[in-house]
């Protein structure tokens, strides 16, 4: 049920199970405010309905390290880092072919990080270790080509095929540092030319400059601090947000925008969790004893509204949030480069919104599922990256099951 709300778009805590939602603004710049409640009224669950990937079996069904994957009308394409290859499957998980291979020649790549598949143009694209080009081939692995990039990709290695060209995040400056990023959406043609571009909002970088005391150090992300977040959409649009509040903006291909707000109460950071995360940041600066001092404001004692945004093929927005933290003793698997007896792990929370910005509700994520790669959908199913109980990488089909009415 949707009820009218008299308040403006300020964020308030959820106080009711009934959805209170309104849309204001103009046709060019709308605002969707979720004052309270959700469409479902309670969290949805994920029902497992299939998977790809075995702990033991044929090599084409055993994954090493998955960097990215795409679901199209007919197939699933899986980009692996170890070994470097694109594996092609049917939706039922039957292996079809391996595309590309390790190397530096035509149709070859090293340390791949992102994949885009354009069924309309019968091409796939792989971003790899060469910052100046993409590897391209047809969907059978033939006609390999190198696609030159106009500027190095910045921060994230995401690609997405859209009706307006190959979408990616680039930089408007030749010199890129964590402190000095001016990011832009770019839509590239088949030959790598920029066909369209749009500047992303300019927000301060959540960066610490750490000093080891001997003249060395590094710039590292500030723990728990909000930072500019974005996601690419298959229709040629994109989403941006700065999670110092629960708000993000959907940028439609026609130039109109929809800014989505939701009630929100930040999670506080436990002092021990704070100390653990700060220690990890200090060690990442390369100081052997982890005693680096930072320049700038201290890290916040509450968590950002969200960590990542994804847009699936149905244009639903997945908001990935960092929930409360808890200590655990399995440091070797969670923080392999940090010597300590107790580590902290945060609960992963997922909120789902429809294309109009209405909050559908939370989605409970099963153990072993990773949301480091965007969800992919087909019909009423969603494909997610997961780890089997034996520790092997898998892709698992789920069906989203709302709570009973």
Image (cartoon, helix red, strand yellow):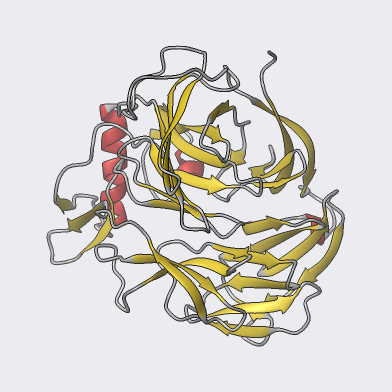
Give the residue at the far bottom of this rendering.
Answer: 105
Nearest to the observer: residue 4 or residue 179: 4
Nearest to the observer: residue 314 or residue 322: 314
Give the residue at the far front of this rendering.
Answer: 27
**Residue 64 seen in render:** no
Q: Is residue 129 above or below residue 39?
A: below
- Horizontal and vertical percent position of residue 58: 85, 57
Q: Is residue 333 above or below residue 345?
A: below
From the image, which quarter does the N terminus lie in?
top right
Nearest to the observer: residue 125 or residue 268: 125
Q: Is residue 302 left or right of residue 348?
A: left
From the image, which quarter does the C terminus lie in?
top right
- Horizontal and vertical percent position of residue 208: 22, 53
The structure residue drawn at horizontal position 55% and vertical position 73%, both measured from the top left corner, is 128
Nearest to the observer: residue 308 or residue 300: 308
Q: Is residue 34 left or right of residue 275?
A: right
The structure residue drawn at horizontal position 75% and vertical position 66%, both measured from the top left corner, is 119
Q: How many marks?
A: 0
Task: Specify the quadrant of the image occupied by residue 263.
Answer: top left
The structure residue drawn at horizontal position 26% and vertical position 36%, both measured from the top left corner, is 275
**Residue 288 seen in render:** yes
């Amino acid at each position: 049920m949707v009820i009218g709300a008299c308040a403006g778009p300020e964020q308030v805590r959820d106080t009711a199970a009934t959805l209170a939602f309104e849309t204001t603004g103009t046709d060019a710049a709308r605002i969707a405010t979720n004052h309270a409640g959700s469409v479902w009224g309670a969290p949805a669950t994920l029902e497992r309905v299939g998977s790809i990937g075995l702990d033991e079996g044929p090599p084409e069904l055993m994954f090493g390290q998955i960097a990215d994957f795409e679901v199209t009308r007919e197939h699933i394409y899986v980009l692996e880092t170890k070994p470097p290859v694109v594996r092609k499957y049917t939706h039922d998980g039957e292996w079809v072919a391996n595309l590309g291979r390790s190397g530096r020649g035509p149709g070859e790549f090293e340390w791949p990080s992102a994949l885009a598949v354009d069924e309309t143009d019968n091409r796939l694209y792989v971003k790899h270790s060469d910052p100046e080009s993409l590897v391209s081939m047809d969907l059978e692995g033939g006609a390999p080509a190198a696609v030159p990039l106009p500027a190095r990709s910045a921060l994230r290695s995401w690609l997405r095929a859209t009706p307006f060209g190959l979408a990616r995040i680039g930089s408007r400056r030749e010199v890129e540092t964590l402190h000095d990023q001016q990011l832009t959406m770019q839509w590239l043609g088949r030959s790598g030319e920029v066909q369209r571009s749009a500047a992303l909002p300019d927000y301060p970088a959540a960066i610490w400059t750490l000093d080891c005391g001997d003249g060395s150090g590094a710039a590292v992300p500030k723990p728990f601090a909000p930072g500019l977040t974005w996601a690419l959409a298959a229709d040629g649009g994109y989403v941006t947000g700065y999670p110092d509040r629960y708000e993000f903006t959907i940028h439609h291909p026609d130039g109109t925008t929809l800014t989505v707000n939701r009630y929100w109460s930040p999670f506080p950071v436990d002092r021990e969790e704070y100390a653990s995360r700060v220690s990890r940041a200090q060690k990442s600066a390369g100081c052997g004893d982890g005693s680096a001092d930072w320049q700038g404001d201290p890290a916040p004692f509450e968590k950002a509204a969200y960590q990542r945004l994804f847009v699936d093929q149905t244009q639903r927005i997945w908001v990935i949030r960092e929930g409360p933290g808890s200590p655990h003793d399995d440091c070797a698997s969670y923080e392999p480069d940090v010597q300590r007896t107790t580590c902290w792990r945060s609960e992963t929370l997922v909120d789902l919104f429809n294309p109009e910005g209405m909050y559908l509700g939370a989605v409970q994520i099963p153990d072993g599922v990773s949301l480091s790669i965007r969800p992919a959908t087909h019909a009423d199913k969603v494909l997610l990256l997961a780890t089997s109980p034996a520790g092997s990488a898998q892709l698992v089909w789920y069906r989203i099951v709302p709570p009973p009415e």
